[in-house]
Each structure stands twice: as C-alpha cells, then as structure tokens.
Amino acid sequence: MFKGLSPIIYGGREVWPLIEGGKGVSATNHLSSGAWAAAGGIGTVSAVNADSYNDDGSLVEYTYPQDTRKGRHDQLVEYSIRGGAEQVKRAYEMSNGKGAININILWEMGGAQAVLEGVLENTKGMVTGVTCGAGMPYKLAEIAARHSVYYLPIVSSARAFRALWKRSYKKVPEWLAAVVYEDPWLAGGHNGLSNAESPTEPQDPYPRVKELRETMRKEGVSEDVAIVMAGGVWYLREWNDWIDNPELGKIAFQFGTRPLITEESPIPQVWKDMLRTVKPGDVLLHKFSPTGFYSSAVKTPFLYELMGRSERQIPVFKKGTEEGTVQLGDTGKARSMWVKPEDQAKAANWIAQGHTEALKTPDDTAIFVEPSARDVIRKDQKDCMGCLSHCGFSSWKDHDDHTTGRLADPRSFCIQKTLQSISHDGTPDENLAFAGHSAYRFAQDPFFSNNFTPSVKQLVDRILTGD
C-alpha cells in the first residue's frame, strides 16, 4: 500500500479514498462500477441515459418515435430512470457488500431532477452518494437529503462552491460527504472553466484546492468533508505532498481516464485501442459542445470536422445594415446574406472546395459545409430528443416553452447521438471521444505495455502501490 494512504469511513463502511470517475453515457456502468466497489473503492454508475436490458439480457434499443421534442424528451427521461436504476442494482449486487456505489448525474442534462429522483426512488439502500456537476446543482442537497444519500458536488473553483454553499448546501450540511475539485484544464468531458480563465493557460491545482479548503473552513464546513482531486490523476506517488497535508485537509482521488482500459470497462475495444495511441497534445479543450461548456476530447476526424466548420466562418449582414457589403451569391439563401468583399472571396474559395452550403449561426455569422454535412446537421436538429436542459445545437429547452429563443447553432452537434454511438461499438473516428489530458500516459505506463488490459481489481491494487 502507498505510504500515507489509509481507508476512510464512507456510508458507514471502510473504503479506499479512490473514486471511479462517472463518465457520461454508458462509459461507466454496473460492470466497471461494481468491480471498483468490490475492489474496496467507490464505484460510480453513470445515470446519464444509462442502458437497460431485455429479459434475455440483450440491450433495450432506445427509440424515439414521438412526433414532438417534448414527447421524445419524456421518453428519454423514462429510459434514463429505468436504465439508471437497473445499472445501480447490478453494480450493488456485483460489489458483494464491499466499497460503495455512487451515481453521477449532469445537472445540465434534460430532466436531471426527475431522473435523479426516479433513480434514487427505485434503488433505496443501494446508492451511497450522488456526484453532480456540469452546471450549478443548487437543488442537489435537498434531493439527496430527501433520499438519505450523500451528495458530492463537482466544482472547479472555491468561488463556485461558495455560491452553492450559501444558497443551498449550508441548509443540509450533514449529507455533504465531499467536494469534488475537477481540474478544468486536465479533466476529460465537460469542464468548469470560467469566462475569466484561459483555456490555453492552465493553473496549478494545488493553490486552487488550498483556496477551496480555506473557503470550506471559513464557511464552517466539517473537516470530515473530503476534497476529491479529479483530473490528471494517474500515479498516487505524484500526489504524495497532498496526502496528510494540513493545508488541504482530508483528500481523496478520482480516476476517470485510467480505468477506461480495463476488462470491465464497457467502452468498445476500438475505443480502448485508440486510447493506447494518444500522444501528448492529442486531447483538445474545446467549446463545440451544445451545452456551452468547455470540454476535453481526443482529436479525431469528428473533432477536426467541427474545427473546420468554425474555421470556415464569416460575418454576415442583412441588406443595407453594413456599408460596403456585397451579396454573398445570387441563388438560394446566399441572396439574403451580405458580406464584406474580402469575406466573399473566402467563401468563393470554400465553395470551390465543395463546401457549398452556407448555414447561419446565432452570432450573425455563416459557416460553409458540404451538402452531406448540412443534411446530417439538419436531420440531427430535427430529431432532437431533449437530452440537455438547454441545447445550443437544436435550441431546445426542457421547460417553459421548450425553446431557448436562439437560432440553432450548426457549429455544434447532437451530443446524445454521438455519445450513444461511441459507447456502443461506434468508431471514435466518427464520434466525440471524451478523455482526460493524461490519456497519452497509456502509451507510457508500463502497466499497460504489450497491450495488457488489467481487471479493475488489478488496476486498483496497482494504484494502491503508488503506481
């Protein structure tokens, strides 16, 4: 066992302070989470549109035949509650009474509160805690308390925690088990980078976590409440100075990327194989997500296509609103777009390359794509099933009049479609492949050499040695 690391009491049980990151759609399920708990850690079932099964053990095919987005959204919520509960029950059974089972939910997920309530209602006594990020989950505390489970908010700054504490969490402090600090420059998936922080200027996590602990102490949060370091965690020996450090207080560690290559990891083999080839710099912190948040993913052809769309972009104006502009073209939608002469020349070049379709964005610009890309964008927008509380790509909103009131943004993509695809045998080349910025370490870590794929138990045992 790594020097200084000791078990903690969580949910009345002694567990290792090692948490499995709860990775989005079907990337952590009962197989990985149950195995992580059985190894003595805290497994985290993703409750984001989780899989459910037929009586013969085959996956239920999620279909959305409803005519309206609201109808499809309601169907999505129903699937999510059923799948989340089923995954928790299977993980709990696999854990054999060891470790603990958490669930992870995204606050910006469509119907997040209904899904969380539904999963907890159907898994009484099985879930120890709920981790929740991707937004400001003010109501997380009251929901957790109502179901007698712990809550672990995911934040990227002391400021975010302070806002949550003052507005809500101070009312139910007894169910606050830990605060997850997710490094916005290192973690995979969606990140909590603020407008005041630069995506190209990463900050040292130590002073940020120190500030978080100081804020927690100032607000009177119990010293028993751990801070979970998430993002960039690979070898525990690299975090030796954090363990038993009085400035930081009680510390636990979350592993998101490293458990992706394990026997129990449910992601397809083609995704696991791709991760072994990632090099430093291959993971991009970008803002193409329809959530509006920054997120980190591997540079695959899918991501390069999104990058290309935004690069082929020019300002557009209505006729007579900008002096010196000219008509983009004399056919189709180009007739209603007026651009600067130098931008007309750029557009002509892109059109000559086959990017003949001009699509307007909410920011008074137009991007240029091939007809096939236009058709996919339009179909995906039309098929929206309301997987987010607010979606920039389709202009869906999960409440009130069900629209954000903004033009649908063709620079983005249907996140539900691509995450379901990549987690169910879709190729990373054609989908978004979330990963933390330490993914390049798979190729450098001797533990994964010669294409070795450990079991979760083998990986946890390895982590406990410091390596």
Image: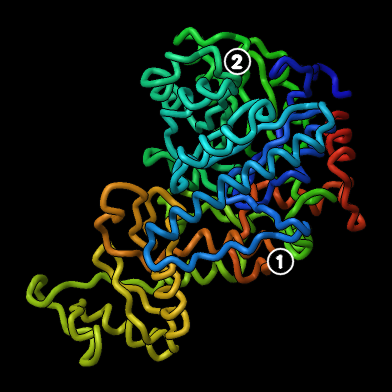
Q: Amino acid at mark 2?
A: Val
x, y percent for residue 222: 56, 9
Q: Residue at x 44, y 83 (%)?
A: 370
The part of the image, by quadrant, that contains residue 357 is: bottom left
User: Which x, y percent locates residue 115?
Assistant: 51, 41
Q: Is residue 282 left or right of residue 6?
A: left
Q: Which mark is residue 141?
A: none
Label 1 sits on a secondary structure element that is loop
User: Which quarter of the rendered picture does the N terminus lie within?
Assistant: top right
Q: Amino acid at mark 1?
A: Asp
Circle 2 sits on which residue? 225
Q: Classify residue 258 as left or right of residue 401.
A: right
* Mark 1 or 2: the one toward you: 1
Label 1 sits on residue: 425
The spot of residue 320 in percent (x, y) is 7, 75
Using a 10 Å C-alpha cutoff, classify the residue at mark 1 as few (fewer than 14 neighbours), some (14 to 19) or many (20 or more). few
Observer-nearest residue: 348 or 374? 374
Q: Is residue 384 above or below residue 190?
A: below
Secondary structure at numbered mark 2: loop
Residue 134 % position (x, y): 48, 41
Pick the quarter of the image with the C terminus: top right
Mark yes or no: residue 185 visible: yes
- The earlier-in-sequence mark between 1 and 2 is 2
Q: Quadrant of residue 236?
A: top right
